[in-house]
Amino acid sequence: MKLKKFFVVMLILAFALTSVIGIVSGFAASSSKLPYVKLTWYVIGTPQKDWDLINQKVNEYIKPKLNAEIKMTMFDWGEYNDRMQTKIAAGEPFDICFTAIWTNNYRTNVAKGAFLPLNKPGRDLLSKYAPKTKKLLGDDFIKGASINGILYAIPANKEKAHNWGFIVRMDLVKKYKLQDMFKKVKKLEDLEPYLKIIKQKEPGVYPLGAYAGESPRFLLDWDKVVDDDVPVSLYPNNKSTKIVNELKQPNTKALFKTVRKYYLAGYIRKDAAQVTDWMSDLKAGKVFVMPQSLKPGKDAEMSISTGYEWKQIDITPPVMSTRECIGSMQAINAKSKNPERALMFLELFNTDKYLNNLVNFGIEGQHYVFKDKKKGIIAPGPKAKDYSPGLGWMFGNQFINYIYENEDPNKWKNFEEYNKKALPLLSLGFNFDDSKVKTQVAACKSVWKQYIPLLETGSVDPDKYIPQAIQKFKQAGVDIIIKEAQKQYDEFLKKTGRKK
């Protein structure tokens, strides 16, 4: 009798083990049985010579895993937004695209119904097809990127805070012995003596990089409540919960006056308001100082991507805002014919070290070489100039990226410490619903295009143009937007228990 019970128990255990093995191996088996599909992925950046070669290698790798191939397309910085808006408006059934608060606008596209909801109750695609990515990001980051509780794009797993400052060309610093600037420069005005020297000594170099959409304006670090091109903001210090028109604030006018002074002194490119591809100037060695969004090791990353050595000067303190949650994301088109497979690809990309680094750094022995394979430390390869996008922050999970030998080997640990010391803004996770003020938001965006590129590059007199811009924004309905935003924000603070 005891022997019979023993065999029954063993039979049950064997059946259970077989079932577990079947579940574990089921995904691989079902992947091979999936119908073959072609995916499309649109990203932003400086087009690379060997892009098609990398795309070919990506397909060789993912086809046996997903029974899919992907067509990767990179549009330049200045054209990406317009190209994507055209494709979305035309109803093109592409699969994946880069989206953010600052280009191919995440909030606007969600309002249009352009992006697929990823964790909708009853259809939680994220949990089913990208569970590891979901775990990597964590609930707080996902909530911060969600709109009305629903996630419509996958945030890049990277630094979760930001600060602003400058990157400075080190070859020119050394050439003219300007090293003291790293101790003396605490604000925009402190740059003046150094810009003057470069203007006198280096006629082919723009002393200060200030371009439309990439200018000293960001040193104000406004906590944008609506979109980057609508002047409805909070001060980034948690001292006030009042939403303001940033153009009416004295610090905005003071900064624009300093930029105007620099423009008149010849420190800024004369046609800066019309230039969108500022990276070309950096790569061509035409810029001495450039305002940038910073993080640990940003200077080393810029050195790699431009071919010039840079060193950063941190100006503003690090803060954690909604911008980090929605500042770099990959969305799946609501009209995608293969959304599940697209999400499976993003899951693979965010968790597979080889695939991730193939897209970020190219082919070993050609675009990079290992200096320490075990630690993932690399150096530029003989064909580095043909493929060096420098876009780890854009593509996905940076914590599995290789590290260049000129970078801090503790880069990812530094990222974690940076995230911890950043001030979480009260607005973290607040996403404005503009459905009641769409007309006013669109009108304000038009006014922004008319005035802000001129003001932020110093191309016009702020004493004359700021009052004009304020009046135009008023006519466009900015006060109506502020009123609606304040109402929603007060409700958000109350709901989250952050109301002061």
Image (cartoon, rainbow, N blue to C red):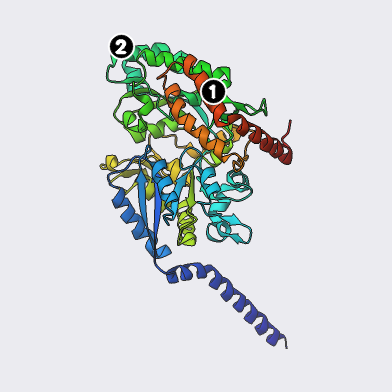
Q: Earlier in the sequence, mark 1 or mark 2?
A: 2
Q: How packed is label 2: few (under 14 Cα within 10 Å), some, or many (20 or more)? A: few
Which sits in the foreground, 12 or 183?
183
Picture quadrant of residue 428: top right
Question: How far apart, in angstroms, are the residues tagged by discs 1 and 2?
Answer: 37 Å
Give the answer, above or below, for where 112 lies relative to 242.
below
| Residue 4, horizontal then vertical, whole percent | 69, 87
| Residue 56, horizontal then vertical, whole percent | 31, 56
Give the answer, above or below, for where 92 lies relative to 28.
above
Q: Which residue is mark 2?
A: 200
Instruction: Residue at 36%, 28% (x, y): give it.
Output: 274
Residue type, mark 2 in image: Gln
Report if residue 179 is visible in the image.
Answer: no
| Residue 148, horizontal then vertical, whole percent | 63, 47
- Residue 266 falls left or right of residue 450: left
Report if residue 10 is visible in the image.
Answer: yes
Picture quadrant of residue 71: bottom left
Specify the label residue 470 is tagged with.
1
- Image quadrant where one finds the N terminus: bottom right
